[in-house]
Amino acid sequence: MNSENAQPRAMSCAQLELLLRARGFHFVKSLGQNFLMDEERLAFIAERSGATGRAVLEIGAGAGCLTKALAPLAERVLAIEIDRNLIPILETVLSPFQNVKILQGDALRLKLEPLCAKELGEGFIVAANLPYGITSEIMLRLFALRGAESITVLLQKEAIERILCGPGSREYGPISILREYFFESEILGEIGPESFLPEPSVTSSILRLVRREGGEPCQEEALRDLLRAAFAARRKTLHNNLSPLLGREGAAEAIQGAGLPAGIRAEAVPLDSFLLLCGEIAKLPPHV
């Protein structure tokens, strides 16, 4: 066998678990550290993410369980991990792979857009087992990455239901609306607690999002601003939430122009109507 053409040999999950114990690693609950240890599931996620021959962003690399499945497929991987104690473990687990860059940092604080442009170029993908405690915040940040052509994530089942829900649902909000605006979506399957170390108390699902073509940055910014105001207080009407931004008369005019009832709440407004509302707001004179 030609050693120059041989694929790097990844550490197995069983070996990785022994390494964690040998290094005295302690799981931090506040960081959502539940590592998927099922080799078959990890390979499935890596393959279905579209990592083959692509540049990949991984948020929350943990102990490298998913990273070691992505690396043999990908052109290069940028693996971000917040826990400094995991960096030496990641360096050990990923030492066979020359196409992985490990970055210690908080993905909620890093400037992801320039970082990805520098390390991954245009047209990268995202694949991650995200910490459940920061699902909404990090997903909204990933939505805003225009270079991310797809996002494949392992999340708590209930979190995915919130991301995919429609108007009228109690969970409907900016994240579900922006997901519909930016992406086509597909659930790839469920994974039970027994596949994780340590076992979480919830069932997880694999969500794949593929970015829709088109969309203007100015419209995206206007939609984000509108949603921030519209859902500022969920129990208030849309009119009351938009009044501080547009004035009471301006809010009423925009809502009427979009063909919406005067007393409607934001949770009942579909994406198309929010886009119409953006257009109506653009026609209004600046509110002082």
Image: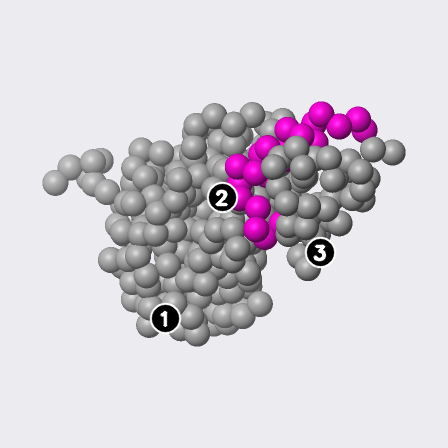
Measured from the top left, where is residue 61 in percent x and y? 45, 53
In the image shown, does 183 or 131 lie closer to the viewer? 183
Q: Main secondary structure of the magenta part?
A: helix
Residue type of the residue flagged with mark 3: Lys
Q: Relative to residue 233, is residue 76 drawn left or right?
A: left
Mark 3 crowd level (few <14, some 14–19, many ≥20, 10 Å Cα): some
Of discs 1 and 3, which sits in the foreground?
A: 3
Say whether residue 188 is left or right of residue 218. Answer: left
Q: CA distance from mark 2 to mark 1?
A: 26 Å
Asked if the magenta segment contains residue 149, the reply would be no
Identify residue for label 2. Answer: 179
Q: Is residue 151 visible?
A: yes
Residue 209: mark: none
Residue at which label 3 appears: 236
Task: Measuring from the top left, give residue 231's x and y in whole percent.
Answer: 66, 51
Q: Please state which amino acid type lies under the numbered disc 2.
A: Arg
Which quadrant would residue 191 be assigned to in this image?
bottom left
The part of the chain drawn in magenta is 266-286
The residue to which callout 1 is attached is 193
- SS at circle 1: helix
